[in-house]
Image (spheres, rainbow, N blue to C red):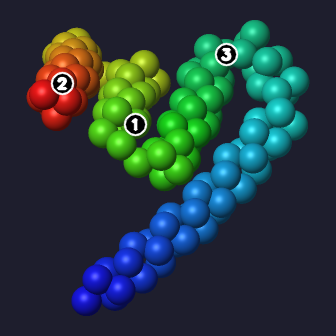
Amino acid sequence: MKKTVRLLQKICRVLELVVAIFVLLGIMTAIISLLKDDIRIFEEVLNDMTAFRHYLEKIFVLVIGIEFLEMLCHPNSDNVIQVLIFLVARHMIVGETTPFEDFVSVLSIAVLIVLRKYMHGSQKIDSDEDRS
């Protein structure tokens, strides 16, 4: 039974790496496409600020993709919370939101930060107890 569990764990790690490679390829493709369009986008931004919002959206998607890749390579609670913070921030900055939605987004980010701080504090306490 233990051999089967170990085999499944190895298969899962390999599949995570394969998915991480696909995500990396997607990020690299998006960066190349973004760099190719930079000059045109900057000219559009001078004439229309909605183009800047579209550009910011592309940048946030790349940042979230990079954070997701890091989460796949090093899965831990801190990376998951960081990805969630970026997702909420992206929604608040790029999306068409109401003041109430902005308020809820700020509260969500605050809760995620407190949760991350609490988890780091509880890990420190747990590791201190293990030493005694």
Residue 57: tell me if it is visible. no
Rounded to the nearest whole Å, what is the CA distance between mark 3 and mark 2? Answer: 56 Å
Q: Nearer the viewer, residue 83 or 48?
A: 83
Q: Amino acid at mark 1?
A: Asn
Query: In this picture, is 71 found above or below 37?
Result: below
Q: Earlier in the sequence, mark 3 or mark 1?
A: 3
What x and y, as percent, mark residue 38?
82, 27
Q: Which mark is residue 23?
A: none
Relative horizontal placement of residue 67, taking residue 62 as reference (left or right):
left
* Image marks 3 and 1: residues in contact by CB distance under 8 Å: no
Q: Quadrant of residue 124?
A: top left
Query: Residue drawn 82% across and 42% down?
Result: 32
Rounded to the nearest whole Å, what is the CA distance between mark 1 and mark 2? Answer: 23 Å
What x and y, as percent, mark residue 99?
22, 12
Instruction: Kindly identify which residue carries mark 2.
Output: 128
Instruction: Kindly identify which residue carries mark 3.
Output: 48
Quarter of the image that includes the C terminus: top left
Query: Residue drawn 58% across and 39% down?
Result: 66
Disc nearest the viewer among 3 and 1? 1
Q: Amino acid at mark 3?
A: Asp
